[in-house]
Amino acid sequence: MPTGFGRTATHDLTHVGLTLAPRRKRGRWLVIVGALVVAALAAGLGAGELLRENAPPVVVRAAAPPSVELLQARRQLEQARAALRIAEARGQELEHQVDSLNQKLNESQDELTFFRKAREGRKH
């Protein structure tokens, strides 16, 4: 069934440029999205720096050579420690001697008591 347009109408339709939708401008949107991503990263890093605890500064000191006063104090300390160890040893030795003498005293008192009772036993 012929429509009556003929060949010229079809030919005209195929050569006419039709625009169904306007072209998208992707370049502008990519720049906006990229700027938003960069801004979000910067905000995250800034917040992280604000929330991070600051460590105390590290101070490294070089060892100074000991002074004469310090060396003398160390010598006196060592002498005092040695004297203390000697005093403790003497104290322990004296305690042993006192224990030994107390034991001998107890034995002598027991012997004396024995002899007194033996002498009293002969008198009666």
Image (spheres, grey):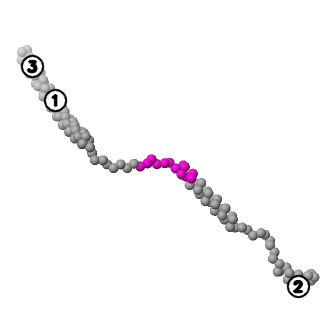
Which residues are the magenta region? 46-58
Q: Going from the N terminus, do you reach mark 1 or mark 3 first? A: 1
Q: Nearer the viewer, residue 1 or 65?
A: 65
Q: Nearer the viewer, residue 28 or 76?
A: 28
In-image side of 56 versus 16 (left or right) = left
> Is residue 50 rendered magenta in the image?
yes
Give the residue furthest to the bottom.
7
Q: Quadrant of residue 70?
A: top left
Q: Quadrant of residue 28?
A: bottom right
In-image side of 75 versus 24 (left or right) = left
Q: Position of residue 35 (x, y in %)?
A: 64, 60
User: Pointer 2 and pointer 1: residues touching (CB < 8 Å)?
Assistant: no
User: What's the amino acid at mark 2?
Assistant: Arg
Which mark lies nearer to you, 2 or 1? Answer: 2
User: What's the amino acid at mark 1?
Assistant: Val
Which mark lies nearer to you, 2 or 3? Answer: 2
**To which residue does mark 3 refer?**
116
Q: Position of residue 33 (x, y in %)?
A: 66, 62
Residue at image position (26%, 43%) is: 67
Q: Going from the N terminus, do you reach mark 2 or mark 3 first? A: 2
Q: Going from the N terminus, do you reach mark 2 or mark 1 first? A: 2
Spatial CA span between label 2 and label 3: 164 Å
**To which residue does mark 1 refer?**
98
> Is residue 104 rendered magenta in the image?
no
State the SS at label 2.
helix
Which mark lies nearer to you, 1 or 3? Answer: 1
**To which residue does mark 2 refer?**
7
State the SS at label 1.
helix
